[in-house]
Amino acid sequence: MYEDGKYKRNPDVSWRTIEGQAVLIHNRNSEVIVVNEVGTLIWERFDEGLESILRNIQETFEVSSIEAEEDARGFLDTLISAGALLPL
């Protein structure tokens, strides 16, 4: 389960945003993850911390704080499972 400040981006994951969607490539296992606009915002702003990310999701997509947090934490857990985020 994701905890703010306890994870970092995996240096073995390359990424690029193409037409509003981030494409993550895990270089060691050649896994490709294409994420939607919300996931792209989370990935691009990961270093800003969870509170900043949640505010941006709420403002950009006009959702409640509860929905923003559920979506963000679910996506971050997916990134951990995929090896895109590593524990510090």
Image (cartoon, rainbow, N blue to C red):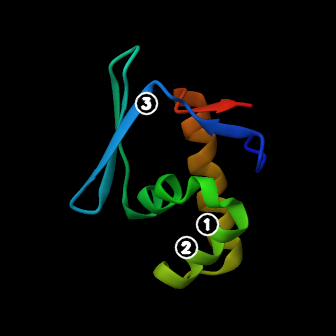
**What residue is pinned by disc 1?**
53
Residue 82 at what x, y percent from top left?
A: 52, 29
Q: Is residue 83 left or right of residue 25?
A: right
| Pointers 3 and 1 in contact (C-beta within 8 Å) | no
Question: Which residue is nearer to you in this view: 76 or 7?
Answer: 7
Residue 26 at what x, y percent from top left?
A: 40, 25
Tag 3: amino acid: Val
**What residue is pinned by disc 2?**
57
Could you tell me which residue is drawn at 38 percent across and 50 percent down?
Answer: 35
Q: Earlier in the sequence, mark 3 or mark 1?
A: 3
User: Where's the C terminus, which quadrant?
Assistant: top right
Q: Secondary structure at mark 2?
A: helix
Position above or below: 17 against 13: below
**Which mark lies nearer to you, 1 or 2?**
1
Q: Secondary structure at mark 3?
A: strand
Could you tell me which residue is drawn at 64 percent across and 77 percent down?
Answer: 55
Disc 1 residue crowd, few under 14, some 14–19, many 20+, Cα 10 Å: many
Q: In this view, which residue lies farthest toward the left?
A: 19
Could you tell me which residue is drawn at 70 percent across and 38 percent down?
Answer: 7
| Pointers 3 and 2 in contact (C-beta within 8 Å) | no
Alpha-carbon distance for marks 3 and 2? Answer: 23 Å
Disc 3 residue crowd, few under 14, some 14–19, many 20+, Cα 10 Å: some
Could you tell me which residue is drawn at 35 percent across and 41 percent down?
Answer: 15
User: Where's the N terminus, which quadrant?
Assistant: top right
Alpha-carbon distance for marks 3 and 1? Answer: 20 Å
| Pointers 1 and 2 in contact (C-beta within 8 Å) | yes
Position above or below: 28 against 65: above
Q: Which mark is residue 22?
A: none
Q: Which mark is residue 13?
A: 3
Alpha-carbon distance for marks 1 and 2? Answer: 6 Å
